[in-house]
Image (cartoon, grey):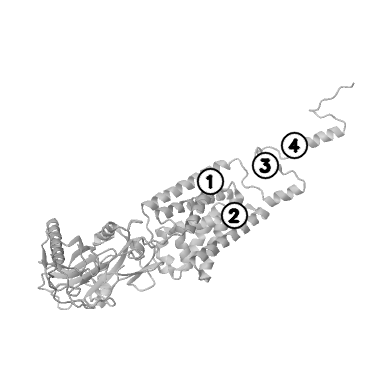
Amino acid sequence: MPQVNSQKSSGSVGKYSTNICFLAAHLALICIAVCCHCATGSNIVVRSLPSLKNGKGIVLTEEVPQVPMTTREVTITTGTTLSLQWDAIPSDVGYVLFQAHSQAFPVIMSYDVKLTPENHINSTNSGLVVLLAPSTVSASVYVYNPHDSDVNVLLVTASYAWPNPIVGGCNMEFDVEIAPYLRVAFNNLKITVDYQRSLEGHRRDTPAAPTCDQSVASLEYTVYQYFMKEKDRSEEEYFRAVQSMLSVQSVEKNAMQIGPMQLGPITRVQFTSNPGQGVVYSVVVRNAYNTSLVSSYVPAVTYGCNLLEDGGTCQIPILPFGWVLSFISAITGLFLCFFGHRYFKFEMFIFGFLGSSLLGYVLISTFFQSDYSIHVILTIVFGFLGGTLWLAFWWFAGIPVLSLLVVGFVFGFQLACVVFYTPFGELTVFQNDFNYWMTLTCITLLPMLLFICCIHKLSIVSCAVVGSYGAVLLLDRLLGSSLIFIVYNVIKRATVTEFNLLNVGTPFQMNDIVLSFVWSLLSAFGITFQVIRESKRPPFPPSPYIVWRISSEGTNVGAFVNPVGYEERQPLLSDRSQQNYNSTSVANGQTPYNAQIPSRP
């Protein structure tokens, strides 16, 4: 996470120590520099210069090749300052943008070897702009490693022609005068990205440069978001992701554009946080009157957590209780997917449990502040109570249409969550809570309206889709994908204050595609299996209470309690009518057709 911190300097002239170990370190560093020179063709010189740490260390001066953008991965040893210098700059270049990116340990980038609060930035994604005077042919900055260990750094140098906007040229809040970088802050719920306005580009010899007030009307800003590979927090993936977001062309090609926010500061964008998932943010500024004049800010990377803590795992630990719930959810979901409608009382309890748990979680989160484990336990208790009550309702009422209201509600809610998980849910109109919840309610009620003529099909489809999703959630937890956010984002919208101001972006990568395919396949198999299995059975079983009541009255309820073997065209009272007929015939002295007349003795 980029962080800007001021540090005092006690810079003084460093001298080579006579210590043999220190000389050996110098020689090793020279060898590394020569190897880098041979690999890239740049001129690297090692010399003794004032250091940024107590007058000790050395400064590497690197002459950057004359190309629009260069990148190089280097290792900066502890206490070492690297000087980036670009010579023989063409006259059409208006400014040079230097960048330094490190994954976990922030490095200091400054205009001078002597640090002041206004001339440096301490960040994992540093960047400084060097404006060029009419006679200037070179530009340089310094990168310093203040840590006790070596740091791998990606160095980037980009040049922009004079008509292009000067990124961060109208800085009002950040420490340095021109701030081309992004400032990122995060917690478990949201990520906040701040940037400063840019200034219109101008020639080096322009006597009166454009003002910031003029630039406000002429420059447009677009924020981009790029997700790194899920569960991949390696340094290689970090550098690869940063390099894919350096130029304007690469940003527009690889990243997802974020729509404008109507509420909040224009220079601030907020996103939902998914701790452990690496995200790269960048801002592109474009001249509204000449769209070919465009520049890109320094990209910023965050994992929604601190990589220096917990051994760099950057994951919320899953308690054993959470794993138990996941396995129970998977087993219950598979059974519901293939046998839910057949065991109708089980279906009633599970869907009553799910609907009550959802409602209970929202109410507890809204009105009570409790520990997470207590929160989960109360939600489960609420779910058991609701499931039992809904099963009791079916047990005594036995009305399928009314009993399937909760089933249709849960299935419709699942469908609405899927719809809002797509880019459709990112439309600006849904920042308004009324628009959001009214649309979600309409989608939730849609399945019950579509299946009103065949409610037994609603039962089968709901069991298959909801049950297969519960089974897939276990794989989602094992693989670290994002399908759980299909429902979780909607729940957070209902429980987190000002969640409507956040851009709800979640990755959809290979793991998510595979799990979505598995979910669809399980749903299709479950629907097909249950439709075939229930084709020769009554649509719904009888209510246990009604069966008991009829049985207690001495009425024959065989067709209700044991429907197997009965056909729809078979008369329900065939046995009884035959028996009554025979009884009547015998009473009148007539012999039934199938009776044998005994012979007289």
Cα–Cα span, label 4 and label 1? 36 Å
| Residue 281 coordinates in the image, percent (x, y) | 31, 64
Asked if marks 1 and 2 touch (Cβ < 8 Å), the reply is: no
Residue type (three-letter) at the residue carrying disc 1: Phe
Q: CA distance from mark 2 to mark 4?
A: 37 Å
Would you say 523 lies left or right of 302 here? Answer: right
Residue mark closest to the camera, 3 vs 2: 2
Which of the two discs, 4 and 3, labels the residue nearer the N terminus? 3
Quick one: quadrant of the N terminus?
A: bottom left
* Mark 3 / mark 1, whichever is N-terminal: 1
Residue count near mark 4 (Cα–Cα under 10 Å), binned few <14, some 14–19, many ≥20? few
**Residue 7 lies in quadrant:** bottom left
The answer to whether residue 201 shows anywhere in this view is no
Q: Amino acid at mark 2?
A: Phe
Residue 338, numbered label: 1
Looking at the rendered structure, the kind of residue marked 4 is: Asp
Question: Alpha carbon of mark 3 to alpha carbon of mark 1: how far?
Answer: 22 Å
Circle 1 SS class: helix
First reached walking from the N terminus: tag 3 or tag 2:
2
Q: Amino acid at mark 3?
A: Asn
Mark identifier at residue 562: 3
Q: CA distance from mark 1 to mark 2?
A: 16 Å
Q: Which residue is mark 2?
A: 349
| Residue that mark 4 sits on | 575
Q: Are marks 4 and 1 in contact (CB under 8 Å)?
A: no
Q: Residue at x 62, y 47 (%)?
A: 540
